[in-house]
Amino acid sequence: MPATSPVLQVRDLEKAFTPGGASVIKGLSLDINAGEFVSVVGPSGCGKSTFLHMVGGFESITGGTMTMHGVPINAPSPRRGMMFQDFSLYPWLTVLQNVCWPLEMKKIEKSERIERARRILETVNLTRYADFYPAQLSGGMKQRVALARLLALDPEMLLMDEPFGALDAQMRELLQEELLQLWLRFSSEGAGQAHRKTVMFVTHDLDEAIFLSTRVLVFAAHPGRIKADVEVPAGPERDANFRKSDAYHRTRDHVWDLLREEVLKVRAQEESA
């Protein structure tokens, strides 16, 4: 397959939860290339998380096509790793054991999975907490453990559904910066862009989307579809100072204008119902 082929290709995607029922997603098409960090924003109920779960293989497709490297997506796959807002950690397992658990499910030999888990814990600065239990960790640390577990599986594509939504604002910004650096760090281990993880990130936080992403998809509501595909005018090697730049604020204003139109439409529909 040519290197320029999209990792994910979606054409005229449709989703309805009941036969003959109203579509929550309709006419959605896009391509996502290797190494892109694509965030999805939109009004509540526009189908952002539903779409992400469809990409993950957890939700069926009503119509259209969705493929990864040309192969139809119809079930979960280790090539697409999912990270949810709740931490989903097992309280009876230590941090190290939590990271090892999916590797054990893949029948990876014990010494190899421990070595891989310890290496990932070092990457997310949690080595000293390897023998701690989730109840002994802060919310931000728990989410870093969940991220370490996802990275240990080494999926080609990371699917992240509001992973920082339950955290306070300060911790959220710090973890955004850590996630960005992790994304860049993993790219440097391979042959450049082709080996960087491809990320799809659903969020309600506009600033989070712009800071992290190479592209921001703005979803329209009822039914969910792509209203705009906005390229973020900054290279991936950005840092916290990007938040202070004119390019950042211009992009934020543009995306907010697009999103505000959809939010107002939803409010008007609710008030007229």
Image: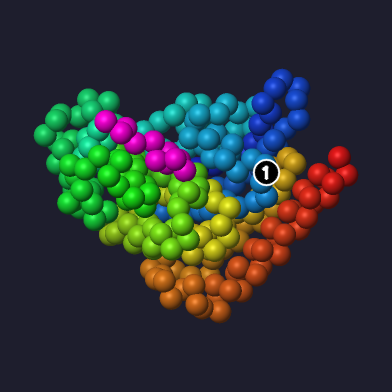
Quadrant (top left, top right, bottom left, bottom right) of the C terminus: top right
Q: Residue at x 71, y 49 (%)?
A: 220
Which secondary structure dominates the residues rendered in magenta? loop
Q: Seen in the image, is 24 located left or right of residue 153?
A: right
Choose between 38 and 168: the one closer to the eye: 168
31 displayed left or right of 136: right
Q: Amino acid at mark 1?
A: Cys
Is residue 252 covered in magenta?
Answer: no
Q: Outermost residue, left direction?
A: 111
Report the residue at 49% width, 72% height from top. 243
Instruction: Identify the residue under disc 1.
Output: 46
Q: Residue 174 lies in what quarter of the image?
A: bottom left
Is 262 left, or right, of 120 in this rendering? right
Residue pushed farthest right? 272
Q: Picture coordinates of residue 93 (x, y %)?
A: 25, 33
Give percent across and percent down for residue 103.
25, 32
Residue 156 image point, x, y percent: 37, 43
Check the image and name the residue furthest to the front: 136
Q: Is residue 236 above or below residue 266?
A: below
* Residue 97 drawn above or below residue 208: above
Do we see residue 122 in this rendering?
Answer: yes
Name the residue located 71 percent from the left edge and 20 percent from the top edge. Answer: 19
Nearest the camera: 64 or 45?
Answer: 45
Q: Determine the secondary structure under disc 1.
A: loop
Q: Quadrant of the N terminus?
A: top left
Look at the image and give the residue range highlighted in magenta.
82-92
Across and down, in percent, residue 272 comes to 88, 44
